[in-house]
Image (cartoon, rainbow, N blue to C red):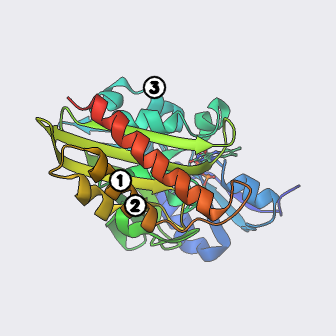
Amino acid sequence: MIPGSFEYHRPASLDDAVGLISSLGDDALLVAGGHSLIPMMKLRMALPEHLIDLQDVQSLKSISIDGKKVSLGAMVTQSELIASDALCKVCPIIRETSLQIADPQIRNLGTIGGNVANGDPGNDMPAIMQVLGATYLLTGPNGEREIAAADFYEAAYFTARSEDEILTAICFDAPATGHGSAYLKQKRKIGDYATAAAGVILEMSGDKCSAASIGLTNVGDTPLLAEEASAILVGSSLDDDTIKKAIAAARAITDPASDGRGPREYRTHVAGIMVQRAIALARTRAA
Ligand SMILES: Cc1cc2nc3c(=O)[nH]c(=O)nc-3n(C[C@H](O)[C@H](O)[C@H](O)COP(=O)(O)OP(=O)(O)OC[C@H]3O[C@@H](n4cnc5c(N)ncnc54)[C@H](O)[C@@H]3O)c2cc1C
């Protein structure tokens, strides 16, 4: 299908982009890689009168790692995340997750900012950003503010971002040296959104788990941070009984729709399997 007509804007700086979105109001939408928005426009589920393309805003395109502090500019593409050895060294779960998003063509244009700002529960990065305890930086006409990824998602396609704000960066502390992580995603075919997926970051102290964080993708209206399941693992040796309890706690917070990916009971079941396998893999990767 052909999208509705719109006026195209291509600001060269963040200030210009903020000026445009402030003056054009809710008739305007930002476009980054376009791989979520353009399909919605073709389906006429999004009908902006103005599109503000962020491609020329160079200040949004850098990956910065300063000691433990990591900052990802909103316009960094999924391919650039994969290509960054420095990022992979401190936080390998980002590369592992990016590689499971869509296909190389989409990853060459799709951005981390678009992926987390979109609010689609099928997007893979939001749960990972919650697991990492990330903060999103938003800039609008009233200046800059921060919001935790854990507080950003309100419902499918509804977030705490106001219409005149631009997500500029995603910031987090790299997990501790020696941590283990894994992102496991069951999907119907390569390039598909998850039937259910789980991201896990673990720290071990001897044979005891000293820290754990578990997130779930596409088994609710929002990404889910499985805090109770994570707490169950801490202090344990990740024995079978503890893992069973953690899986039950993770399944208890899911609320997937029955759809082409399967009935809700199946998707809840798969979420538990992804949690189990991601814990096991993260455990083997932890030093
Ligand atoms: C066939 C197909 C399969 C896919 N499979 C997956 C998958 O398995 N997993 C997955 O995670 N994704 C998947 N995607 C989505 C893809 O990863 C998108 O690229 C991504 O979700 C959105 O990034 P984008 O840069 O393309 O954003 P856009 O499509 O440009 O924008 C998405 C939304 O975010 C808003 N936005 C963009 N940038 C900003 C910003 N800086 N500040 C505020 N708002 C902003 C836009 O206004 C829009 O509402 C798939 C897409 C396709 C077409």
Answer yes or no: disc 3 within 8 Å of ligand 1.
no
Q: Position of residue 63 (x, y in %)?
A: 36, 37
Q: Which residue is labeled 1 in the image? A: 244
- Categorize mark 2 by other alpha carbons within 10 Å: few (<14), some (14-19), many (20+): some
- Above or below: residue 150 compared with residue 217: below
- Mark closest to the chain's N terminus, 3 or 2: 3
| Foreground tag (3 vs 1) | 1
Image-quadrant location for residue 7: bottom right
Q: In whole angstroms, how far apart are the C-alphas of marks 1 and 2?
A: 6 Å
Comparing 175 with 2, the one in front is 175
Identity of the residue drawn at 45% across and 25% down: 83
Q: Which residue is labeled 2 in the image? A: 248
Q: In whole angstroms, how far apart are the C-alphas of marks 3 and 1?
A: 36 Å
Q: Position of residue 155 (x, y in %)?
A: 53, 73
**Residue type marked 3:** Ala
Identity of the residue drawn at 43% across and 62% down: 224
- Categorize mark 1 by other alpha carbons within 10 Å: few (<14), some (14-19), many (20+): some
Marks 3 & 1, CB-CB < 8 Å contact: no
- Mark closest to the chain's N terminus, 3 or 1: 3
Give the SS element for disc 3: helix
**Residue type marked 1:** Lys
Identity of the residue drawn at 87% across and 55% down: 2
**Residue type marked 2:** Ala
Q: Which residue is labeled 3 in the image? A: 83
State the quadrant of the N terminus. bottom right
Marks 1 & 2, CB-CB < 8 Å contact: yes
Marks 3 & 2, CB-CB < 8 Å contact: no
Whether residue 1 is visible: yes
Comparing 203 with 104, the one in front is 203
170 horizontally vs 114: left or right: left
